[in-house]
Amino acid sequence: MVKNSASNLLTSVDSLFTTQSERDEAKRETVVMLSPSEISDFPNHPFKVRMDESMTEMVESVKQYGVLLPALVRPKPNGGYEMVSGHRRKRASEIAGCEMPCIVRELTDDEAIIIMVDSNLQREKILPSEKAFAYKMKLDAMRRQQGTRTDLTSATPLQKLEKKSSREQLAEQVGESHEQIRKHIRLTNLVPELLDMVDEGKVAMRPAVELSYLSEEEQRSLVETIGCEDCTPSHVQAIKMRNFSKEGKLNDDVILSIMQEEKPNQKEKLKIPTERISKYFTPGTPVQKIEDTIIKALELYRRRQRDQSR
């Protein structure tokens, strides 16, 4: 008769001093009330917490009813907690001055990243920059997880059969094409000023992707030119800059020359010499204020013209 090993014969110390129900309870996730000050934000959280009308409504709701849906946090090694899902609820709780319910869960860094991204992608409004960094963070986490296993146990049978890449799996999960995932992640190579222009709709996705291949110095030179010329690059212009950059020939003069090219769909602009209107404004008046004043004057002039014709 084969004897069992000592490890199978010995009863664990844990089981000697606790009941099974107590051990099950220790493993079960519970909802606890935490102060927002006990919870730090997720490192490099790509989703902005905006103080908009929606946040104002959330704060009022929290003041009246409290936070109804628990946030998800994970314990930090040195005490306190790290937010995984619920940054907007945390901010609302801070403003409302109250505690918030949280589910405390032990998670690895990559598990936390994937949950954080998935939960925030459910938002109604997501900026291109938010998608860009969120997709990159999740894709990197997925690749690290796949690198730690040899049998792809976390993949579906179809994924195992077709040996789909992490990017292809991500595309299926978020409902985007493989190419759209690539384009969004390219945006993470833009300098903040250009990325802001993409978020604001001043620079479209296609030219933005081309510009992402420029060096940081070239991009900053472009930002300066955009400010001076008061125009943004078209897709064709962005391709030209990328090609010049690839050849090592893109400099300030080339960027200016490309940006001064007339676009096929460019609207004609009315330009008034500064010396013709400067006498009507005090020195240092902002350009936007001058423009607004001129528009108001024209509206008043048109109103008087209509009154006189009656």
Image: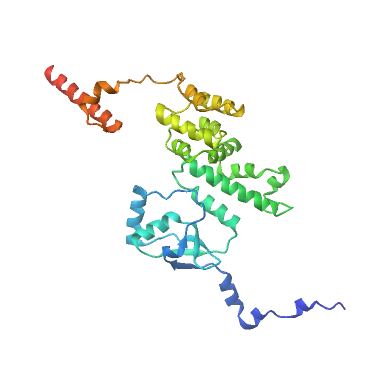
Quarter of the figure with the C terminus: top left
- Residue furthest toward the top? 309
Whether 102 is drawn above or below 14: the answer is above
Could one spot residue 310 in this view of the protein?
A: no
Whether 166 is drawn above or below 102: the answer is above
Q: Residue at x 56, y 66 (%)?
A: 77
From the top left corner, tell me how far across and down residue 256 is, in percent.
Answer: 47, 24
Q: Is residue 70 left or right of residue 76?
A: left
Q: Is residue 8 left or right of residue 181?
A: right
Residue placed most toward the observer, 207 or 152: 207
Residue placed most toward the observer, 269 or 148: 269
Could one spot residue 226 in this view of the protein?
A: yes
Q: Residue at x 55, y 31 (%)?
A: 210
Quarter of the figure with the N terminus: bottom right
Whether 297 is drawn above or below 22: the answer is above
From the top left corner, tell me how far across and down residue 231 is, in percent.
Answer: 42, 27
Q: Is residue 179 left or right of residue 162?
A: left
From the top left corner, tell me how far across and down residue 164 is, in percent.
Answer: 68, 43
From the top left corner, tell me how far across and down residue 185 is, in percent.
Answer: 56, 40
Residue placed most toward the observer, 219 or 251: 251
